[in-house]
Amino acid sequence: MLASEVPAAPATPASHPSAKTVWDTKTQQYHGGQEWSFLDNFVEDFSVTTNGLGIPQKALQAAREALDVCHHYPAADQEPAKTHLAKFLHPESHTGIHSRLLLGNGASELIDLVTRAAPEGPWKPGPWPVQYKEYERSAIALGRTVLPPNDPTPASLTCIVNPNNPTGDYMHIEDLKAWIESTVADNTVVMVDESMQPWHSPAFQSDSLISQSEWLADLYATRGIAVYIMHSWTKLWSCTGLRLGSLVCPTVEHCTKLKKVQVPWSVNVPALKFLEVVTSDAEADFLAETWDVTPKWRKSLVDRLLAMGAKQSWEVRGEDFLSWVWIDMRDEKVAADAIVRAKRAGVPVRSGVPGYGCHTCVRAAVRKPEQVDVLLSAWEGLVDQQ
Ligand SMILES: Cc1ncc(COP(=O)(O)O)c(C=O)c1O
């Protein structure tokens, strides 16, 4: 399709602000996932890294039914959802995890909580060229100085996203441990975001900090390094609107300290019910299918993108198991055009520009092949115009 044949963007009703105006860019951090509701021809949201299988239906039904009791407060101890999640995270030693686990209204709440509680001083990201921005946003909002990844100045708070959103970079467990040991200063705090790590495989724990309790305890005892493990559950279980996140603290004492300052009932009744069911045997098939189809859909998407961008040597980054691709289209104008065309076709993608400053890059979710067809036909002719 030539550029001139791309359908015109649907007129935006005056009552609908565009996604751009939804963010107060002076005070808020841009995030994907806002455009879908303004597109009259919306097909699928490629701008967020949620599961291509959509919402797990049994958990959704349980959350719907839980609305019937929304005239009651949620359980103050977040049970039984918390126990279910601990068992999901580490079936063999769930009691050790449970005593250090906190649930939150999305990971965002917990990122903010730890950033507030960590000792004052500079903040440093992981080693990646760009990293998910919420950690930095929270650090800046709380008055911390932001250091570049390779700055030798010790940081009070270090935050690494692994696997990294948006680039898809990933350190396997021994490399991650070595990076923490060599980069992080004694008596400081580290957050490791493993939100996308459970996509790894049914044995995801084997490559995760979740199964490194002894190493974590030793690191704290010998060097005073407190490592928190963060999970956003809004991607794996496609519940961004419901809001679910969790935090495994380094010790029970750290967990108690945070619980004291956490806003009560931040996880609502439907979200707790959703979590309880999604981590149970009732949704085991959903996860099995996720681990089966995501790498297949991703490979097909990558192959098609590489063929489409062969002339411009497009690069597609990220681990094979991930729910998105990070595409370097090598040209700012092409990347900008890709954003416009995707939106016009009802399949918005995430530009690499806002927040990340990657002008030649675009992030697209892994989705069902028939949905990918819509995106890729909108992109036909993108590189031919060069
Ligand atoms: C790596 C990562 N961590 C944390 C979050 C925060 O997610 P939420 O607050 O929806 O749980 C996101 C959202 O995009 C993310 O990509």
Image: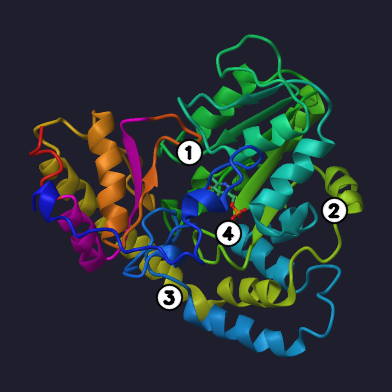
Give the answer, above or below, for where 183 lies relative to 28: above
Q: Name the residue under label 3.
A: 285
Residue 295 showing in the rendered view: no
CA distance for labels 4 and 2 = 19 Å
Q: Give whichever of discs 2 and 3 has the lower sequence position.
A: 2
Q: What stretch is highlighted in magenta?
A: 359-379
**Element at label 3:** helix
What amino acid is found at the position of numbered circle 2 in the picture?
Answer: Gln
Q: Which amino acid does label 1 sit on?
A: Asn
Neighbor class of circle 3 (other Cα within 10 Å; few <14, some 14-19, many 20+) is few
* Amino acid, disc 4: Trp
Q: Is residue 381 above or below residue 90?
A: above
Q: Residue at the location (13% across, 38% down)? A: 383
Mark 1: C-beta under 8 Å from nearest atom of ligand 1 = yes
Q: Which of 123 and 246 is in front in this view?
A: 123
Q: Mark 1 points at which residue?
A: 164
Callout count? 4
Disc 4 versus disc 1: distance between alpha carbons?
A: 15 Å
Q: Kindly identify which numbered label has been placed on residue 262.
A: 2
